[in-house]
Image (cartoon, rainbow, N blue to C red):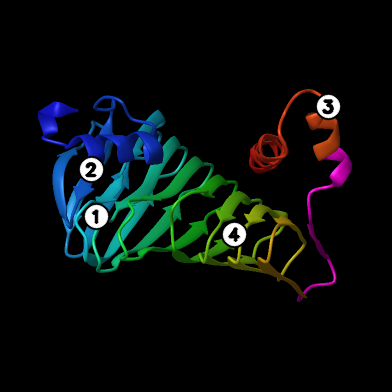
Amino acid sequence: MEECGFSEIERDILKEVVGLYAIPEGAYNFRINGKSVSRKSSANIDVDIVDGGLEIHIKPGTKNESVHIPVILSKTGLKETVRNTFYIGDNTDVCIIAGCGIFNCGSSDSVHNGVHTLYVGKNSRVKYFEKHYGMGQGRGAKSLNPITKVYAQENSFVEMDLEQIKGVDSTKRETYSELKDRAKLVINERLMTHGRQTAESVIETKLLGKESTVDIISRAVAQDVSKQSFKSVIVGKNKCRGHSECDAIIMDKAMVLAVPSLDAQSVDAELIHEAAIGKIAGEQITKLMTLGLTQTEAESKIINGFLK
């Protein structure tokens, strides 16, 4: 990545948020400290800079291609709002790799607000990955606030993998979706907070079409005196299926609030929610300690397995 002039810290963040060790194949845009520093379109994916963010057009019929759009803040005190819009054509099969990392060793807060809107065409499959990460020992906060909107047309399938497990002081995550006939959305969310960190997640889905489906699974771990809240809203307006599941491990003096909500507006809507909050079972820790692990190592192993 040296050819893009990235610093060692910036390269480390890229490895964490998008798993990159080299310039990726296909389309991409790297945004660092408020500016696009490297951008490339492909034959089927156009990446254009617009006021406040990107417009990404994926041609109908595009198969097995990806677009990387990582964001890095490595200067203290930066605050930005970025709006990226994806126009995904019919009959596509693509992967979107987003994510943001903040390095803050200063005394001023650094904030990234990201708004991603996905218009998904008919019969298309989209995998969307978004990982958030914070590092740096400064007194300034590291704040990440993503808003993701998905508008899925008939027979489409969207899978979202949302992860934030280290270093972010505060986050407010909003995910909104509307699904047409036979469209399916799967959301897997993983969150971990510690210290005095706070995390708020709101996921709202409107099942507009016949046989539309959503499956929401949230895994969370709250440690120390951190605070988390999770709210899911599923609105069924047709013959549809919706499932929301929130499982959280609470430790120390942390607080977790789970508020699942179901709104059936059709007699043919099938909506289910599940929520469970509890501590790590003592017998799990004891069993691992008998294998030679310390209590801290046992807890870490259990948490890592839970968040996978």
Q: Residue at x 21, y 66 (%)?
A: 77
Q: Position of residue 278 (x, y in %)?
A: 80, 58
Q: Element under label 4? A: strand
Per the model, the C-alpha gap separating discs 2 and 1 is 9 Å
Q: Nearer the viewer, mark 4 or mark 2?
A: 2
* Other-residue count near label 4 (Cα within 10 Å), few / some / many at <14 / 14–19 / ≥20: many
Q: Residue at x 44, y 63 (%)?
A: 169
Q: Which residue is mark 1?
A: 54
Q: Mark 1 vs mark 3: which is more N-terminal?
A: 1
* Other-residue count near label 2 (Cα within 10 Å), few / some / many at <14 / 14–19 / ≥20: many
Label ID, residue 290: 3
Residue 57 relative to residue 93: left or right: left
Kind of residue indicated by mark 4:
Leu
Kind of residue indicated by mark 1:
Leu
Label ID, residue 179: 4
Quick check: can you spot residue 235? Answer: no
* Residue extent of the magenta highlight: 264-284
Per the model, the C-alpha gap separating discs 1 and 3 is 53 Å
Per the model, the C-alpha gap separating discs 3 and 4 is 49 Å
Q: Element under label 1? A: strand
Quick check: can you spot residue 78? Answer: yes
Q: Which residue is mark 2?
A: 29
